Amino acid sequence: MLEEKLKTIPHLPGSYQMRNKNNVVIYVGKAKDLYKRVNSYFKGNVTGKTLKLVSEITDFTYITTKTEQEAFILELNLIKQYNPKYNILLKDDKTYPYIEYIKKPYPKLKVSRYTSIKKKDKKILFGPYPNVYAARRIVNLINRLYPLKKCEGNPKKVCLYYHINECLGYCMKDIDHEKLQNMERDILSFLRGNNKIIKDKIMEKMEILSNNLNFEAAQTLKEELKFINIILDKQKVEIHDYINRDVLNYYLDDGIISVQILFLRNGKIVGGSNEKFYLIKDEIDEINGYILNFYTNHEIPKELIVCDNINKEIIGNILNTKVYTPLKGKKKELLLMAYNNAKIALEQELKIIERNEKRTEGANQELQELLHLDTLDRIEAFDNSNLFGSFAVSGMVVFLNGKPARKEYRKYKISVDKNDDYNTMKEVIYRRYYRVLVDKLTFPDLILVDGGINQINACNDVLKSLNLNIKVCGLKKDDKHRTNELIDGETLEIIEIPRSSDIFHYLTRIQDEVHRYTINYHKQIRSKGSIKSILDNIEGIGDVRKKALIKKYGSVVKMKEAPVEELQKIVPLNVAIKLKEFLEKFTTNNTEISHEK
């Protein structure tokens, strides 16, 4: 079937989607000529990750476009939509912090992270700063040196910051605008590269503090001066045109690409990004695709310096920025620096990458063979918990190809009786997989439940009622809360796994992850909903009584301190006694209010 389908592919640009036997998209690519590219997977000599990809392909689809540039954009959008297994191997997808200057309604500095930055946003951003500590320290320093707005909200009268000359009194709305403009000019000038302004300001303030015999504060500022000198010191390769630009180069070895980006802000290198990923398709297509994907999550610079084989015209058109390759001078030196950094990073970490991949993928493959599964790309694990027999919650974590997929984690507040483990499991499994059916989401290859036969039976009963055939296993812990046994959901037999094996550590990691996630949900309930959530769990307290209690006391502590006689004015005596007993128990154990099954 594939052989006949390959013959019908047109010689046109577009994007192709490789699918496995479950019709799940496992790889998205783009091509100038779809026929040549897709056929190359099945008729050429493929090795490494490409060989593994091809072994899982049972079908493919494609979408044609008018131009290669449109194919680039389509590929990028489809990768975001499908999050395919082989497009995300080893990729980091991290964002870097920026220093953001907020001009209105009041001048303020903060450290910001953005998942998407576009030129039209018109934000005043400086960075990125790969070192978030440096970004925060700079913001704190500027706040100490200049009277920016520091408090939250809009107070009705001036606060301490105003009286110690660290705020202009913005809440009074009677501001010295000339002083405000001078301050803004200094701050923006410094963030754009003029180090002298801040250094002079520090020296001036140190002298004032020393004259006032405040030597400790002067010493603190002296340390800040050293810090500024370190992070903003003269560099060997420096460009004095103050243009924000990035320099990108890469190194390829043993089927892995190392991409290095140097961030130049105001002519100076402020840091860089290095990411490594497996080569699946054409080397240049991988790099072009990487660049487009990177700048959907990062600020697009005014210039992007790249190596000569990058498709500069297409990248420049899509990103709407200048992309070029310098032939000589300092910019050429920067390009070589990026190449050397990419090479060093890959050479240093190649063995670590291979070892980690072998352990993670190896354990996943071992588990697949142990459970006699055709595929094991997706695992969904569940844990149920309650707080003192109350606040029943569940958590679900997802592992894709041996790695946690945190964006797909889910949490559930359970409505069934708090001490009913069987029906708690039934509720969460039903809610999850009914939703998967309705929304046509991806089904897991394996479901892991935290617990023994009771939880397994509950899970199997729900799956049967939904007419779903998914492998279920139970992860049981010993008295010391350590992973102890893997129980087969079909035979209910214990599967022996050596404690020193990779597969045992893999299962332990999954169980620890779902437990951690569920416990954190408990903490959220405690911190957010405390009083309201507590009252929801006391029999005899409905909406009217709840509102009256919250209006009178406002907090758990004040409610606990109230005598029963006082509480009785709002609720009946038996309810007041129950409430008092629960509050005593709740607040006494406030440091660890999680109670496992």
Image (spheres, rainbow, N blue to C red):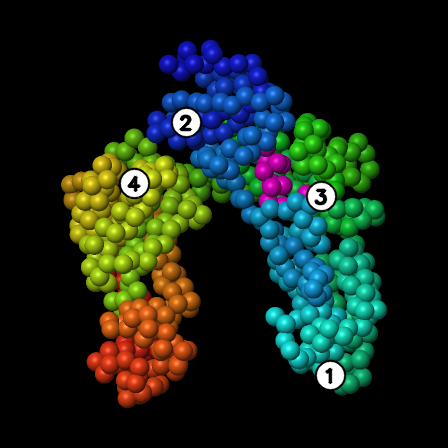
Residue 459 shown in magenta: no
User: Residue at position x 63%, y 41% from top?
Assistant: 295
* Label whose residue precedes the other's in the sequence (3 or 1): 1
The label number, if any, that marks residue 77 in the structure image: none
State the residue in front, 570 or 232. 570
* Label whose residue precedes the other's in the sequence (3 or 2): 2
The label number, if any, that marks residue 446 in the structure image: 4
Q: Which residue, given by chain and number where applicable, does mark 1 sit on?
A: 214
Q: Position of residue 458 (x, y in %)?
A: 20, 49
The label number, if any, that marks residue 19 in the structure image: 2
At numbered mark 1, what does the secondary structure look like: helix, strand or loop?
loop
Quadrant of the snapshot with the C terminus:
bottom left
Q: Position of residue 153 (x, y in %)?
A: 61, 70
**Is 461 on the left-hand or right-hand side of 106?**
left
Q: Which residue, given by chain and number where applicable, does mark 3 sit on?
A: 301
Whole-number angstrom distance, CA of label 4 to CA of label 3: 44 Å
User: Residue at position x 16%, y 44% from top?
Assistant: 492
At numbered mark 3, what does the secondary structure look like: helix, strand or loop?
loop
Q: Nearer the viewer, mark 3 or mark 1?
A: 3
Q: Nearer the viewer, mark 2 or mark 1?
A: 2
* Label whose residue precedes the other's in the sequence (2 or 4): 2
**Is 510 on the left-hand or right-hand side of 298?**
left
The magenta stretch is: 289-301
Residue 296 shown in magenta: yes
Amino acid carrying label 4: it is: Leu
Whole-number angstrom distance, CA of label 3 to CA of label 2: 36 Å
State the residue in front, 149 or 553. 553
Q: Is residue 195 above or below residue 378?
A: below
Q: Position of residue 478 (x, y in %)?
A: 23, 58
